[in-house]
């Protein structure tokens, strides 16, 4: 541990202002990933090579802040900038064509799946891994489909739901590959959430931010333990959740299971959906090509 601490301190001491400004860009990318279905903030931390430092901060906040406060300040600045700008852009896109936005986001999810499977298989695969995937997939569908059929998915925004959104965001940061925005889309909270963040509505931002912080602090050690002791099973369960929450936001599936849902199906509309899906899939696939393998947990 002492040797590891010395290495971190040496890295921080040698960081230039260019590298610290690059930290702002990394923070912005991570927050945008947390906003987008299919792109996990935690996975982006892995891709950008800072997941270990982020998890160290979450597990030992006071100790790590003393050692790496400059690094985390610039990451934090970028995170805030990314949330504010990303929310505005996504809100406008959803307002212009929600179905096209969904197909773009689903493309991002599909394109990220090879990288997510690669991440899950870093430490081998067991029968328990596949069982965890199937159980998580079936459990999520068994919960989500009946809710959709009863018309209970478009919930009314409230303080409780903003707290739940913050909890989901927190999970997306500490669990590589977990994309909570899929679930937020399922509940129909995406448009009011993005609009509130873009308009700096602190009645939404504050409860979400506090519940996000509470979640990462409360769960980081437990998730870190799961990643170290049952990495493959845990990550395959995450994949099951991602697949299930993607299936239920597919517009053709929503037509079947959600009362009153419709979307345009003209030739021009379908062409737009295909292009949007392809853009999302290619973008996520390209991003997965640069993913760095995290060192195996000891």
Image (cartoon, rainbow, N blue to C red):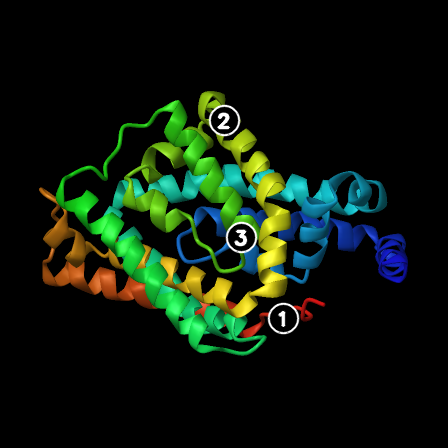
Q: Earlier in the sequence, mark 1 or mark 2?
A: 2
Please tell me in which quadrant of the rendered image residue 292 appears: bottom right
Q: Nearer the viewer, mark 1 or mark 2?
A: 2
Residue 97: % across, % down: 25, 47
- Give residue 174's mark: none
**What residue do we see at 39% from left, 44% from top?**
90
Instruction: Write down the residue under mark 1.
Output: 292
Q: Dot 2: what SS? A: helix
265 up-or-down from 152: above or below: below
Instruction: Write down the residue under mark 3.
Output: 41
Asked whether 150 or 11 is in front, the reply is 150
- Give residue 207's mark: 2
Image side of residue 199 versus residue 156, left or right: right
Crowdedness near tag 2: few (<14), some (14–19) or many (≥20) residues, C-alpha within 10 Å: many
- Quadrant of the drawing holding the N terminus: bottom right
**What residue do we see at 45% from left, 26% from top?**
204
How far apart are the alpha carbons under marks 3 and 2? Answer: 19 Å
Question: In the image as oriented, which residue stretches furthest toward the top?
Answer: 203
Regarding residue 93, the answer to whether it shows in the image is no
Please tell me in which quadrant of the rendered image residue 242 appears: bottom left
How far apart are the alpha carbons under marks 3 and 1? Answer: 15 Å
């Amino acid at each position: 541990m002492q040797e590891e601490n010395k290495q971190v301190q040496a890295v921080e001491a040698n960081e230039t202002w260019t590298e610290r400004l690059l930290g702002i860009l990394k923070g912005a990318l991570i927050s945008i990933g947390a906003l987008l279905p299919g792109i996990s903030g935690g996975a982006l931390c892995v891709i950008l090579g800072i997941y270990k430092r982020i998890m160290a901060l979450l597990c030992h906040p006071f100790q790590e802040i003393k050692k790496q406060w400059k690094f985390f300040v610039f990451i934090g600045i970028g995170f805030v900038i990314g949330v504010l700008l990303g929310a505005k852009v996504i809100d406008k896109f959803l307002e212009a064509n929600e179905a096209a936005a969904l197909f773009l986001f689903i493309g991002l999810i599909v394109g990220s799946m090879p990288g997510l499977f690669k991440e899950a298989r870093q430490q081998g695969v067991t029968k328990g891994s596949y069982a965890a995937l199937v159980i998580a997939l079936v459990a999520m569908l068994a919960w989500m489909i009946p809710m959709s059929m009863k018309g209970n998915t478009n919930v009314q925004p409230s303080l409780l739901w903003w707290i739940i959104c913050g909890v989901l965001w927190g999970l997306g940061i500490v669990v590589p590959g977990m994309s909570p925005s899929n679930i937020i889309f399922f509940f129909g909270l995406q448009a009011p959430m993005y609009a509130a963040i873009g308009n700096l509505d602190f009645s939404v931002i504050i409860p979400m931010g506090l519940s996000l912080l509470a979640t990462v602090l409360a769960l980081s050690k437990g998730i870190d333990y799961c990643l170290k002791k049952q990495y493959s099973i845990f990550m395959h369960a995450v994949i099951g959740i991602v697949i299930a929450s993607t299936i239920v936001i597919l517009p053709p599936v929503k037509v079947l299971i959600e009362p009153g849902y419709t979307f345009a199906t003209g030739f021009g509309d379908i062409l737009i959906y295909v292009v949007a899906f392809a853009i999302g899939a290619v973008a996520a696939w390209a991003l997965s090509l640069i993913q760095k393998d995290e060192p195996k947990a000891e």
